[in-house]
Image (cartoon, helix red, strand yellow):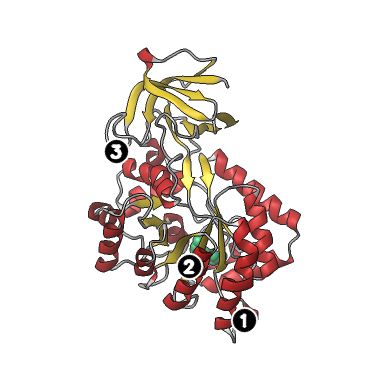
Amino acid sequence: MSATLIDNIGTLVTNDPQLGEGLLGQITESAMVLDGPRVGWVGPRAQAPAADTRHDAQGACILPGFVDSHSHIVFAGDRSGEFAARMSGQPYRAGGIHTTVAATRAASDSRLQEVARWQRAQARMQGTTTLEIKSGYGLTVADEQRTLRVAGEFTEETTFLGAHLVPEEYRADPDGYVSLVTGDMLAACAPHARWIDVFCERGAFDAEAARRVLEAGRRWGLGTRIHGNQLDHGPGVQLAVAERAASVDHCTYLTEADVAALAEAARRGPQEQTVATLLPGVDFATRQPYPNARTLWDAGATVALASDCNPGSCFTSSLAFCIALAVREMHLSPQEAVWAATAGGARALRRSDVGHLAPGARADVVQLEAPNPVYLAYRPGVPLVHSVWESGTMVYQ
Ligand code: NIG
Ligand code: FE
């Protein structure tokens, strides 16, 4: 197993306050050793051990790869027209999901693979080393299963979202659709999924149906997560906390009681907590209000940032863009936003091996074309990713 020394690091973000300064555990004038697929050592340059090869970071910032805990990149079709209509005043309608469902059902496996491969590659070039991928644009047993098979070619973090919307053919029988999702569809999909998710929102699934979906998923050994509080105040956050879901995503409309529940949930510890996953790109692309992440953070909630990359509500895969929005519009500090897009995402996926760079962590590493992590928010829209390593192997430069 060969070891690589990354030397001459301007600022190393470890996300471990015991290893360095502040929330991000930053070590300046530092070095790190990638020992095969793991981080072997981090510390001051002067103390760096020998290694087989040396990479000169030339004073740049090194940080853990982004952990994007929410995406829907297996789909077909185009909805740019909806975006343009929203920008001229139309509201976001989750019903647009049906457009993508029709296109996805009609697409070949190889077309779905092609779309996912390109989306995954673009995310990697922007520093994302862990990417969760959901189904949810098939909504038949066969189409949900093949979506998850395709997703599984690109990630180990696959999520079954058969309960995305009631498809048009079940419009007269929504309960029948929930029975399908929790029965045959789940049986076909569970072997290909790690998580189950449900869109708990008016017009999608109510709290009772959502609870049925999560309970069924748990019986198949899946972890649980919820799309909630996106379009209105709704039951999603409270349900997620009560069900001990790993995260509740969107959180655009939060009451004080929701914030308090998320703060309380954070106190349960890494394997039991419910993370508040904010999706600033969605609020941007749907002209929704931005939730106040400052309030959540100060209350003690665990906050993650994710892209929600999908053709309808938000078609970005850039966590740097999400960080910039979270700083400018949601009142996180640049350091907090970087933490939320790395360590926060790892918490949302209940992963302890990614999202930080302490010895033993997976060597998922990003080098920026910048001296410190503040630049991610300070230089929005600029491609700052210089190099990416996944499990110790350089995958982009
Ligand atoms: O996370 N909220 C539900 N689902 C997606 C949007 C899907 C779409 O519009 O195609 C989301 O925003
Ligand atoms: Fe989503």
Amino acid, disc 2: Leu
The quadrant holding residue 261 is: bottom left
Q: Position of residue 232 (x, y in %)?
A: 38, 72
- Checking the image for residue 23, the label placed there is 3
Image height of 311 relative to 385, above or below:
below
Query: Which is in the foreground here, disc 1 or disc 2?
Result: 2
For numbered disc 3, what is the local secondary structure?
A: loop
Q: Earlier in the sequence, mark 1 or mark 2?
A: 1
Which residue is drawn at the image coordinates 70% and 66% (left, top)? 142
Q: Is residue 351 left or right of residue 327?
A: right
Residues at circles 3 and 2 in contact by the CB criterion of under 8 Å:
no
Tell me: is circle 1 under 8 Å from ligand 1: no
Tell me: is circle 3 under 8 Å from ligand 2: no
Q: Nearer the viewer, residue 14 or 377?
A: 14
Residues at circles 1 and 2 in contact by the CB criterion of under 8 Å:
no
Disc 1 crowd rating (10 Å Cα; few below 14, some 14-19, many 20+) is few
Q: Position of residue 283 (x, y in %)?
A: 42, 61
**Residue under pointer 1:** 170
For numbered disc 2, what is the local secondary structure?
A: helix
Disc 2 crowd rating (10 Å Cα; few below 14, some 14-19, many 20+) is many
Q: Position of residue 92 (x, y in %)?
A: 49, 70
Q: Earlier in the sequence, mark 1 or mark 3?
A: 3
Mark 1 vs mark 2, CA separation in Å: 20 Å
- Checking the image for residue 214, the label placed there is 2
Answer yes or no: is residue 397 visible.
no
Image height of 14 relative to 126, above or below:
above
Of the 4 image quadrants, the one containing the N terminus is top right
Q: Earlier in the sequence, mark 3 or mark 2?
A: 3
Q: How many marks?
A: 3
